[in-house]
Image: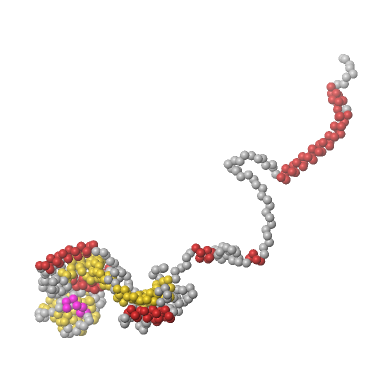
Amino acid sequence: MVMTDSPPPSDRSNATQSGPQGLVLALFRPVLFACAAIGLSIGLLVFFHHGAPVVATAPTPQSETAAVTLPDPEPAPLITAQDFQGFQPAGPGQPATTPGQPSQQQQQADAEPPASDRYELTLRLEKGDTIEKMLADINVAEADRKQVDEKLQEILKKRKIAIGETITLQVQTMADQPDAPRVLSLSVRPQPEHEYLITRKDDGSYSGEEKIYKVTTRIVRVEGTRHGSLQQSGVSAGAPSAAMIDFIRALSYDVDFQRELKEGMKFTVLLEQLVTSDGKITHPGRLLAGELFLTRNVVTIIRYRPAGGADGFWTPQGESVIRSFLRTPMDASHITSGFGMREHPILGYSAMHTGVDFGAPMGTPILAAGNGKVMMAGFNGGYGLYVKLQHTADIGTGYGHMSRLGPGIKPGVSVRQGQVIGFVGATGMATGPHLHYEFYRAGHPVNPLAQKFAMRAAMSGKDLAAFKAMTQRYQGQLKNAPQITTPPANTAADARQPGTPQAPQVASGR
């Protein structure tokens, strides 16, 4: 074993560090650790106070807007009392308004034009009325109403306006006098072809004029269905009552109403109306032709006046519809009891029924079966109110159980075929409203439905040729003429109600 003076390897490092530098390092090591700890603490505090640092990156589709730091807002100015002047609080469902901002009502007024202050008013002339009084009732100024009345009297030329006539006014409400309307025009039309018009001029005065309208004819048709009375069915469909009465009388010679006329049957009537140049109807319609569609055939009647003859109705073959006697004496009837032996409904035993009973509504008109003279008109025992007619020396007819007599019917007067001699009732020994109709030959009652009536007249020559041409034209118009329906009611309500609000009667605005 060799022994030397050199120190071992482990002791070389210790000897090196134990010099002057090692001494200094040993002395400052605690100070360095303390400074590092203090710096770390300060760094952590700064990090947590300002947050994580923002790293600038390129914009992405999800974030295209860079963060912007806004400056702090300036303090709002103080509110004074002047700021509340002109402020309007909001009502229910409305926004509040501030000074300088228009209200919602003002905005609507600016957006919408003002409502029209002109309107039409219809008044009816009552007993004791004058035009001036009517205008005074609606508060027209005295000066205006006097002018209007004077001008109307000038153009009427002593003609009078009938009670019930309608007066049409165009009036205007003035902003400075809302309770005194101004009359712009007044018109009255007592006849469809004559109108009297008063108009206000620009200078405040009034002028008057009479307008005369030309009257022309117009051919129209009415189609209907029989429900109950044939006459009322026609009126409901739009035909005038007088035209339907002519239609029924013309049919009554060939149609057995109580057996052939059924509910739901169709009919058409052709009418000739009179119309003014401004479209007003002066006559609702004269019957020119008609068709009744029965179960097995169609009955057609045509109006025609032959040369030297009277206006009447004819068949399409040129034969007059008039026979010596009507088949049945009224419309809308049905047989309730025939001619012959029967058990009396009141007396309760079998007896001879000397006529035919037609059931019909109370008040249905009863027609004379033919030309004749009234032999009796009054109460007659079980017949009740009764009329007996003598047509020839051999033939007579009787009508019982009437509710009242027809106009002018009394013993000794002459009647025409189809004239109303009474109305259906239930007087005498009757269980309900009906007509008891009797037919006499040589003073003895016979079955009215079994009688054969005289033949009718027929046309020939030029009359027949002209009639055939007219018949062809009418039959085409029965299918193709303009059709009318129920006419509107012609009523004019009195609008004058002083002291109370008027219902709107505006026909058109201006």
| Left or right relative to 104: residue 400 | left
Question: Which residue appears at 24% of the width and 69% of the height?
Answer: 217
| Left or right relative to 317: residue 116 | right
Residue 340, above or below 474: below
Residue 243: tell me if it is visible. Answer: yes
Where is residue 385 drawn, in percent x and y? 21, 82
| Left or right relative to 466: residue 363 | right
Task: Read off the magenta span.
Answer: 416-422
Question: Which residue appears at 35% of the width and 81% of the height?
Answer: 153
Asked where in the image residue 47 lies, by quadrant, the reply is top right
Where is residue 298 drawn, in percent x and y? 18, 64
| Left or right relative to 131: residue 330 | left
Question: Which residue appears at 67% of the width and 42% of the height?
Answer: 54
Question: Which residue appears at 60% of the width and 66% of the height?
Answer: 86
Residue 497: tell me if it is visible. Answer: no
Quadrant (top left/top right/bottom left/bottom right) for the N terminus: top right
Residue 7, above or below 361: above
Task: Please tell me whether residue 417 belongs to the stretch shown in magenta.
Answer: yes
Task: Please tell me whether residue 495 belongs to the stretch shown in magenta.
Answer: no
Where is residue 400 drawn, in percent x and y? 19, 79
Looking at this rendering, what residue extends furthest in the right direction? 5
Q: Depth check: give the residue in front, 302 or 451.
A: 302
Asked where in the image residue 429 lies, by quadrant, the reply is bottom left
Q: Depth check: give the residue in front, 47 or 159.
A: 159
Q: How is the image coloured?
A: secondary structure
Residue 401, above or below 469: below
Quadrant (top left/top right/bottom left/bottom right) for the C terminus: bottom left
Q: Depth check: give the residue in front, 201 or 213.
A: 201
Q: Depth check: give the residue in front, 103 or 444.
A: 103
